[in-house]
Amino acid sequence: MDDTPTILIVDDTPANIAIINTVLKRHYRTRIGTDGAKALELAHGTPSPDLILLDIMMPGMDGYEVCGKLKADPATAEIPIIFLTAMSEVSDETHGFEVGAVDYITKPFTPAVVEARVRTHLALTRAQHALKDQNRLLEERVAERTRELGMVQDATILAMASLAETRDNETGNHIRRTQHYVKALAEELAKDPRFAPALPPEEITRLYKSAPLHDIGKVGIPDSILLKPGPLTAEEFEIMKTHTTLGRDAIATAEAQLGNTTSSFLRLAREIAHTHQEKWDGTGYPQGLKGTDIPLSGRLMALADVYDALISRRVYKPPFPHGKAVEIITEGRGRHFDPDLVDAFLRIEGHFARIAARFSDEPDEVADVMADKA
């Protein structure tokens, strides 16, 4: 492939063209235009010129206008333009740079100067193109690395969540359902201007990814308590309550291994694990937080977790139908749950029912959950 640079020479004076063409044709491919219209035509030809030498004073369309049109067109905007001129006023040169020229060659021409200016600007253009290619390659590598990092994060969360699920296998698709509940509830809440700043799309994505770790602390709860078919004693319940701090500590340990606990992708998972059992009125655990002292992530998971517990079969209870679950959550407005979250839930409670049906643990539960939606 011939990579000889192409130079477009535009001048309405044959003598000027002859001088410049004689100097350049030894090293470059040259093309000739004698007016502004021809210059525009040749600039769009194939191969595209690598550099344009453009006379300013031409009949009809002058060099300034031609330059402006070339720079306004994305197809020719990056072609460097050197003005050919007999004008030497500073204002003339300034105007030329304003419309997009990179340099001037003044008349009468000196062959060595013409050749040196052309060689310099071609080298500069090649360097600029090389830099753009490097930047593009770097951006591609950063994007690929970001994708890889996202996959590692997702795999880490999935592995940890799966570990928790194996300890409490009767909940089946619980972590998948609650993950989708949290996402749906956050998206609805984000429509409220009061909550929108805290719930941009990327934060909702992080909530969705972090939600499966809300019960990771259950790996530290003895089977005799975790899988007990009847009510827990007061002592057993105190042990069960520690799953919130166990989960927080496990995730905090993972964050410490990553070397960052302030902006870690596990930040929300740690919040959720620690605070999803807190209640709006301050009667929850482990800290007895009240109202907005409970992180929004914990408040979202609290509602999602309770809804799923209500509509799911447990060793100690049968599943409630969707309508009953909605009734119980509504009763908990301002006591167990953030009132604004309950209001958002009531606007999309049908969506919750569809999520429950999609990820149901057993076919008969689909009919139970959807009974009130028929």
Image: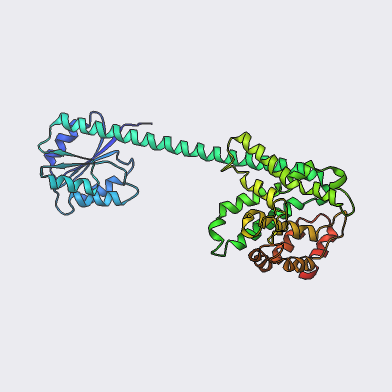
- Relative horizontal placement of residue 255, taking residue 4 as reference (left or right): right
In the image, residue 226 sits, relative to residue 194, either above or below, namely above
Which quadrant of the structure image shows residue 153?
A: top right
Residue in the image at 78% along x and 70% along y: 372
In the image, residue 165 sits, relative to residue 197, either above or below, namely above
Applied colour scheme: rainbow
Q: What x and y, as percent, mark residue 80?
A: 27, 41
Residue in the image at 81% along x and 54% along y: 361
Residue in the image at 81% along x and 68% along y: 371
- Relative horizontal placement of residue 315, taking residue 29 as reference (left or right): right
Locate the N terminus and report the quarter of the image it occupies: top left
Task: Count every numbered label the image shows and give the total.
Answer: 0
From the viewer's side, name the closer residue of 262 and 120. Answer: 262
From the viewer's side, name the closer residue of 108 and 6. Answer: 108
Which quadrant of the structure image shows residue 84?
A: top left
Q: What x and y, as percent, mark residue 318?
A: 87, 60
Locate the C terminus and report the quarter of the image it occupies: bottom right
Q: Residue furthest right?
A: 230
Q: What x and y, as percent, mark residue 275?
A: 68, 51
In the image, residue 60 sits, relative to residue 88, either above or below, namely below
Q: What x and y, as percent, mark residue 308?
A: 76, 58
- Relative horizontal placement of residue 266, taking residue 235 as reference (left or right): left
From the viewer's side, name the closer residue of 43 and 359. Answer: 359
